[in-house]
Amino acid sequence: MVKDKIVGFVWQHVLLLFSMFFMTFGVALCVRSNLGSGVISSIPMSFTLAGEAGLAPGWTIGGYTNVMNVILVVAQILVLRRRFEPIQLFQLVIGFIFGMFLDINMWITSILSYDALTSQIVAQLVGATVLGCAVAAEIRCGSVTMPGEGIQVAVSRVTGRPFPVIKIMIDTLLVVLAVISGFIFFGTWPWVVVGPGTLFAMFYVGFVVKLVNPHLGWFDRMLAYRPGFRRYIYGLARYIYPKKEG
């Protein structure tokens, strides 16, 4: 029984890592479109560009994401106080891995260059679609939330306001702070950080999550699967896609 729980926990988080990798790949594509980054990466992107211009420490977007994630977890502690559950500190580990994956995918997508508006729109659309699908899978994993989602849950819990309302408010706040940082660093609106693609992703990603959720039965079967030494790829494939009787 204990062994099954350990295997289940490890497998759950293996799938979580895959989901996070594709989440950050989607974010990287949105950034490369030059039409605006995603909400959660807008502030780190602004500081990264400032670092490249010598106006801030020269950290990567993943490094600044890690800093922001720490701030968000600390904010949760301040908001929830005694109601903050120590297990939620695991968000720091998840947030660090997210930042690392983001840097990896920024490196992978560094060969891409989108100059024409059509290709930029396609990159933003593909990136936001991949992000939405990965977010749906990440939610299915049932682990602790990402720090960005954690602060939204914490504020909603304390204020009693509906989570969707709080999410819109906090997402809007992050975008506003990214714009302010752009004016502070560059004296102008940072369009490559907060542009039409940012506003598009704010609504489209949620739409994709709702769209793919009913079709993730195969992912649920993967979560229920328990890998062992006697089960290999063929067995996993048969488990995920069982043959229809009759």
Image (spheres, rainbow, N blue to C red):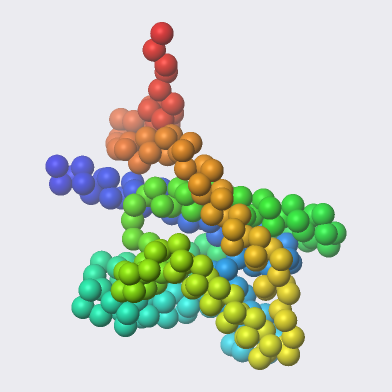
* 180 up-or-down from 102: above or below: below
- Quick one: 82 or 156, which is closer to the camera? 156
- Residue 188 falls left or right of residue 117: left
- Residue 179 falls left or right of residue 156: right
Q: Which image quadrant for residue 112?
A: bottom right
Q: In the picture, which quadrant includes the C terminus?
A: top left
Kindly identify the residue that appears in the image at 30 percent across and 30 percent down: 230
- Quick one: 52 or 79, which is closer to the camera? 79
Q: In the picture, which quadrant includes the N terminus?
A: top left
Q: Which image quadrant for residue 89?
A: bottom left
Q: Position of residue 175 (x, y in %)?
A: 59, 75
Please tell me how many numbered marks the rendered image carries. 0
Q: Position of residue 116 (x, y in %)?
A: 85, 59
Q: Position of residue 118 (x, y in %)?
A: 82, 54
Q: Position of residue 29 (x, y in %)?
A: 66, 58
Tell which residue pokes out farthest to the top in this image: 246
- Quick one: 21 or 215, which is closer to the camera? 215
Tell which residue pokes out farthest to the front in this image: 161
Kindly identify the residue that appears in the image at 26 percent across and 45 percent down: 7
Kindly identify the residue that appears in the image at 21 percent across and 42 percent down: 4
Kindly identify the residue that appears in the image at 32 percent across and 79 percent down: 79
